[in-house]
Amino acid sequence: MKASLLIGLPIALTLLPSQFDRQAISAPIRDVSFPAKTRTLTATESLTEVDVATRAELLEQIATAYAELGQTQKAIEVSQIIADDESRTRALDSIVETLAEARNIEEALEVSQIIADEGSRALALYSIVKALAEARNIEEALALSQTLPSGEVQLPTYTLADDEVRIWATTEIVEALADTGDFPQALELIQTITDDERKALVLQSTISDLSQAEDMQSLSEMIRVLEDLDNEDWILSSLAIAHTHVGNLDRALQVADSIADLDTQAWTLMNIANTLAENGNPEKALEILSQAVADRGWGVGPVASVPIVEAFAKAGDVDRALELSPTIPQTSESQTLESIARALAGVGEIDRALEVSQTITEEDARSSALNSIAVVLADAGDFPQALEVARTIPDDDLQNFALDTIVKALAEAGNIEEALEVSRWSGHAVYVLAEAGDFPQALEVARTIANDRGRDEALLWIVWGLTNAEERERALEVAQTISNLET
């Protein structure tokens, strides 16, 4: 590796992939599941007295609940009483996505036309394309994708580049085709992308997602398409990372060595190393980064990254992970220790994870590590230790999150009495009762909640519980009792 090409490595070691990774060609992640409470009202405070954003948030949730129930017109009515334009648009977008996921495509399309903002409407249509692709309705997805804007898309807070939304849609369809083994049509669709850099990103993403597929011949064909593109730096970067995903490390390093831009090359080397670490080869990953540093003359000795350290921890070599943690550039010791603790918890090494977490000096990082441990314990059914860990979390919000996770896990395991006891800490007794199918008792508890927002959130839990239990009529009856929908 030429020493002169490594000047950008210190920057790349601390960069997130930003616009050059999977997020560059994927739509923003939108979670329409029921969110955690963001704030608690006082006993005398009504929904109409809280700030506009808080009111809008609840109305968005109620609109989504109606969409979940198949009550599209009621969902639209609720969205239309949201005063803030951006919040109203988000509510309509959530309705579209909910309907699309339920394969109610016709109504999703109708609702999308209500969205006034052109950019937001384009994202809503993208969510329909995504649902169609996931349902393997390829022809419909392709047809709808052609209606997406080809120029820039202006959103309330940022601008998407030319063809960006179409690229997202194309990627979803390509991956759906590849998942079904239709690599020829996937490649044919990729070839319709006129911008080589974006084509390279779609190819890299598809190869990365399908790197474990048995059809290596088709994956190799995708790499050959990448090889034929112009030798621009970010195309070469995509090619190098794609080769790494399919195990062609020598070729990956050869391509990386040919990248002229130093920052781009450094970012590529970092991604090659991290890919190796994530695929269970941290030693080779460490070797690549360390050699790069030595070639540049920055010094001798190992240089690691967070994925490399996590990979050593997951492999059971905790001492090696701890030894390497100080070598990660521009990453605090607490952040690194948090990563090690989370990695250990993820592979069930709870005692070691707790030991590491107790050495973290920064409170935020320690809270995050302890939260991860508590969640892993709850998922594994070790509720006593999960509670013990949760109650040591310094950050109130993360502690509440951990306790809520434990409450849900207890309820799902049928430990209703224990879940109710814990819910006195977290405030989710209604969730516990609804999860247990005791909807009359859940309603009784919900109606004792004094403030409007808290009561309406509890009623929403019951609506979703009844919907999941396929008791739609009762769910609608409860939904009608949600208060404060008037302007």
Image (tube, rainbow, N blue to C red):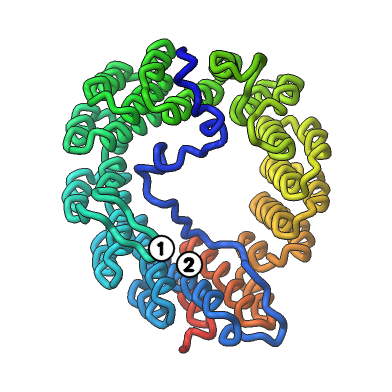
| Image location of residue 158, percent across then percent down | 38, 59
271 up-or-down from 247: above or below: below
Q: Which of pointers 1 and 2 lies earlier in the amino acid sequence?
A: 1
Would you identify the image quadrant in which residue 316 lies? top right
> Taking the image as drawn, is residue 392 in sight?
yes
Helix, strand or loop at label 2? It is loop
Viewer-side label of 1, 2:
1
> Taking the image as drawn, is residue 416 in sight?
no
Q: Which residue is located at x 26 percent, y 59 percent? A: 105
Would you identify the image quadrant in which residue 80 lies? bottom left
Q: Which residue is located at x 67 percent, y 43 percent? A: 379
Residue tagged 2: 471
Q: Amino acid at mark 2?
A: Glu
* Front position in the image: 219 or 105: 219
* Front position in the image: 98 or 113: 113
410 up-or-down from 309: above or below: below
Q: Which residue is located at x 79 percent, y 34 percent? A: 356
Mark 2 Cα within 10 Å, few/some/many (few <14, many 20+)?
A: some
Mark 1 Cα within 10 Å, few/some/many (few <14, many 20+)?
A: few
Q: Which residue is located at x 43 percent, y 14 percent? A: 249
Would you identify the image quadrant in which residue 87 lies? bottom left
| Image location of residue 86, percent across then percent down | 41, 71
Please count the marks in the image.
2
- Give me the disc on residue 447: none
In 3D space, how far apart are the residues under numbered discs 1 and 2 (Cα atoms)? 40 Å
* Front position in the image: 478 or 237: 237
Q: Amino acid at mark 1?
A: Thr
Residue tagged 1: 157
| Image location of residue 166, percent across then percent down | 25, 48
Please indicate whether residue 22 sits to the left or right of residue 34 in the image: left
* Front position in the image: 474 or 365: 365
Helix, strand or loop at label 1? It is loop
